[in-house]
Image: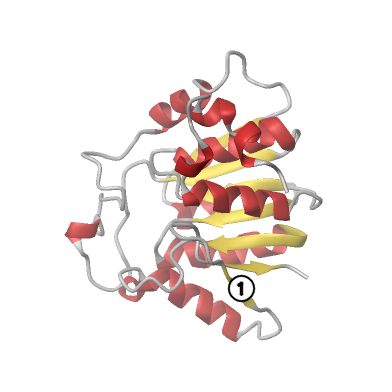
Amino acid sequence: MTELRPCCRRFLGEGYIEARFPARLRAQLALFDRVSEVPGGIVELGVGSGVSLRAWVHFVAEHGPNRVIWAYDTFAGFPPFVPEDGQEIPALGKRVGGETELRDRPTTKREVMRSVLAMFDRWPADVFLDIVEGNIAWMLPRYTPLAPVALVFCDADTYAPTKAALDVLWPRLAPGGLIVFDEYGHQPWPGETKAVDEWLAVNPELKLERLSMESGPEAYVVKP
């Protein structure tokens, strides 16, 4: 397994001791290692402020060159919810235009890209990043990765983009690849769970596996 400390020195800084590394970052690194031998790119659905995206870019730059990273987000907070998502909960950021990170406003695409570029003195020639702005449920079918995909990190929280990810990206996923669900089983976010459960009901040969990492993503499915 890739060692966390040397891998993340540039991303987190020399002063970061291992005990302070976020559990989420550990989970991302474990997932990245899991697909180290799987060909294809990485897709993130739900960029937010770009913390997870910066980690993917860093891992690819250090340990997985020539992987394309596709990132999708509205960069305007949540679009309108559908009935499967349940009621809005403003205290959790669950409202149209809101975000779970409860910032004053959504981070723009330009701000996210600036934060990614700030990690490097010069952009690595073998790291390819494509950030797609817009409603994920609409944009993903229209702007679909053409190359194989090794890892899908689904962090959009709601029903429609999760369903789009399963419908559009599962066929693109390489054998041995993972599709990961960050909010699976979280009661305030029933839409993601409902989309996954509906999909598994018509694909009973597939098995949902749980991750036991505090503050990390919740579950994933491996493509046979």
User: Under tag 1, what secondary structure?
Assistant: strand
Of all residues, the one furthest to the left in this rendering is 91
In this rendering, is residue 193 above or below 104?
below
Q: Looking at the picture, how far across and down is residue 21, in whole percent?
A: 49, 42
The image's colour scheme reads secondary structure
Q: Is residue 93 visible?
A: yes
Q: Are there few (<14), some (14-19), or many (20+) residues within 10 Å of tag 1?
A: few
Q: Is residue 146 visible?
A: no
Residue nearest the observer in this picture, 144 or 72 = 72
Q: Looking at the picture, how far across and down is residue 26, in whole percent?
A: 56, 49
Of all residues, the one furthest to the top in this rendering is 121
Q: Look at 18% across and 59% down and name the residue there.
A: 90
Residue nearest the observer in this picture, 110 or 101 = 101
Query: Viewed as shown, does residue 58 lie left or right of 45?
Result: right
- The residue that label 1 is drawn on is 209
Q: Looking at the picture, how far across and down is residue 66, in whole percent?
A: 76, 34
Q: How many marks?
A: 1
In this rendering, is residue 73 above or below 86?
above
In this rendering, is residue 65 above or below 187?
above
Query: Viewed as shown, does residue 90 lie left or right of 136?
Result: left
In this rendering, is residue 184 above or below 100?
below
The quadrant where residue 60 appears: top right
Q: Looking at the picture, how far across and down is residue 69, in whole percent?
A: 63, 40
The quadrant where residue 51 appears: top left
Q: Amino acid at mark 1?
A: Glu
Q: Look at 66% across and 82% down and name the residue there.
A: 203
The quarter of the rendered structure image containing the C terminus is: bottom right
Q: Look at 59% across and 42% down and name the residue there.
A: 70
Query: Viewed as shown, does residue 195 lie left or right of 221?
Result: left
